[in-house]
Image (tube, rainbow, N blue to C red):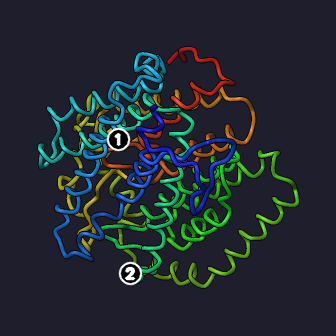
């Protein structure tokens, strides 16, 4: 049986239990745990084991490829859902087109290390391949829920690590070099959103987990992430008719109490931010990054500068010699890396995801998925990823296939 290949467990987990016969699949759970925890691998390698950062990054990529091998071995010969059916899904075709163009761009990329960039590109491809293979070989809903549970639990582990770390000079959580506040905030936000999706599907009780991750997000002081999260959650709270008015008032009261509890920290951080803060973390610093990325992108407007072309190429910024990893804006990042083609791919990807979500019947699951998309779009105004999208390609593939397999939707091809 396919479920046996993925070692299905039906006993309750520590933070959420299987309900209505929904099984916990171990391999997707481990994959979800890895997808979240890998943000802390370099930190642990450097700060705990005193290794070089390159060693930690290489170990993280090695785990990615090991998971791909394990999933491919377990899925060998299984064909619960055909790849041909999956490729009829518009979002998955957009994902393949994006990966293909990103891979081709290595031929003209201005990256400092083409070989290292190629390995990172392979890592992004491996993430998508792992998800597709798992969904091909096992029940889609169980794979998705198990992966989300692993991701949420791992986000809690990373959040706990962040709380135990000494606070840097700017008072925020994290290590500025190897696990910065934006990474922590992003993991916590996605952990909350994935937990909310599980709750909307009546799969477990995640209230305490959501509370812990939300408080960690506030404490991280990741400004863009926190603003995007509060806006997205506010829209969700207003539109979710499944939540009573009394519960909404209680939630708003808890948010207000949390804001008051952290008010002293916010005030101290504001003083640090406006006086001695890292230039790259201020609006002035971001505009300098935007200006450089835009000028470089305009020189190659059609196909861009290529995959991983900004790192070590953009001159260090400010007196602290900050080196930008990306363009600090998702549209600008795609324009810099892949030109007009990249912007078109970005629009096509997010548009197709939105159209897939709109196929779901009105209800809490659909609202949560729209909240995830809104969170990503707002955060993209001042954040980006160097290799992937803010809504990772593996998540786009996972959610699109999940929606197409939902009984209440028509499993027809979505016109791109």
Q: Position of residue 374 (x, y in %)?
A: 59, 44
Closer to us: 17 or 342: 17
Given residues 376 and 396, the one toward you in this image is 396
Residue 111: x and y in percent read: 16, 45
* Cβ–Cβ under 8 Å for marks 1 and 2: no
Left or right of 61: which side holds 38? Answer: right
| Label disc, if present, on residue 168 of the rendered structure | 2
- The local crowd at label 2, few if under 14, some if 14 to 19, many if 20 or more residues have their Cα within 10 Å, is few
Q: Horizontal and vertical percent for residue 30?
A: 41, 51
**Does the rendering let one see residue 159?**
yes
Q: Up-down: is 121 above or below 160?
A: above
Q: CA distance from mark 1 to mark 2?
A: 32 Å
Q: Which residue is mark 1?
A: 127
Residue 407: percent from the left, percent from the top?
Answer: 66, 24
Q: Nearer the viewer, residue 117 or 33?
A: 33
Q: Is residue 336 visible?
A: no
Instruction: Determine the residue positioned at 62% across, 27% down.
Output: 406
Q: Quadrant of residue 176?
A: bottom left
Residue beneath the point at 57% across and 63% down? 14
Q: Is residue 345 above or below residue 179?
A: above
Q: Is residue 108 above or below residue 199?
A: above
Q: Residue at x 19, y 56 (%)?
A: 58
């Amino acid at each position: 049986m396919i479920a046996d290949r993925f070692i299905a467990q039906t006993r309750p987990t520590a933070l959420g239990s299987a309900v209505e016969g929904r099984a916990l699949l171990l391999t997707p759970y481990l994959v979800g745990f890895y997808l979240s925890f890998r943000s802390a691998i370099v930190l642990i390698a450097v700060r705990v084991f005193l290794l070089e950062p390159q060693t930690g990054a290489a170990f993280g990529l090695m785990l990615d490829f090991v998971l791909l091998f394990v999933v491919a071995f377990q899925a060998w010969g299984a064909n619960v859902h055909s790849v041909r059916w999956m490729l009829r899904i518009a979002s998955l075709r957009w994902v393949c087109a994006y990966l293909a163009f990103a891979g081709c761009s290595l031929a003209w990329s201005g990256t400092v290390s083409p070989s290292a960039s190629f390995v990172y590109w392979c890592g992004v491809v491996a993430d998508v391949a792992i998800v597709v293979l798992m969904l091909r070989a096992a029940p889609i809903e169980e794979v998705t829920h198990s992966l989300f549970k692993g991701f949420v639990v791992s986000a809690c582990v990373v959040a706990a690590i962040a709380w135990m770390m000494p606070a840097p000079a700017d008072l925020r959580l994290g290590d500025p070099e190897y696990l910065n506040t934006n990474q922590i905030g992003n993991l916590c936000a996605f952990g909350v959103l994935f937990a909310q999706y599980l709750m909307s599907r009546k799969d477990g009780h995640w209230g305490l987990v959501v509370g812990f991750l939300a408080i960690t997000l506030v404490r991280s002081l990741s400004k863009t992430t926190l603003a995007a999260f509060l806006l997205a959650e506010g829209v969700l709270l207003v539109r979710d008719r499944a939540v009573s008015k009394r519960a909404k008032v209680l939630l708003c009261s808890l948010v207000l109490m949390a804001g008051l509890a952290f008010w002293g920290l916010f005030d101290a951080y504001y003083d640090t931010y406006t006086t001695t803060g890292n230039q790259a973390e201020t609006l002035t610093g971001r505009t300098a990054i935007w200006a450089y990325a835009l000028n470089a992108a305009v020189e190659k407007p059609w196909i861009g500068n290529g995959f991983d072309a900004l790192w070590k190429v953009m001159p260090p910024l400010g007196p602290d010699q900050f080196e930008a990893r990306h363009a600090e804006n998702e549209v600008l990042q795609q324009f810099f890396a892949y030109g007009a083609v990249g912007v078109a791919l970005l629009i096509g990807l997010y548009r197709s995801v939105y159209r897939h979500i709109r196929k779901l019947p009105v209800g809490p699951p659909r609202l949560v998925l729209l909240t995830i998309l809104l969170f990503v779009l707002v955060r993209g105004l001042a954040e980006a990823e160097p290799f992937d999208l803010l809504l990772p390609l593996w998540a786009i593939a996972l959610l699109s296939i999940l929606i197409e397999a939902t009984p209440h939707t028509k499993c027809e091809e979505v016109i791109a």
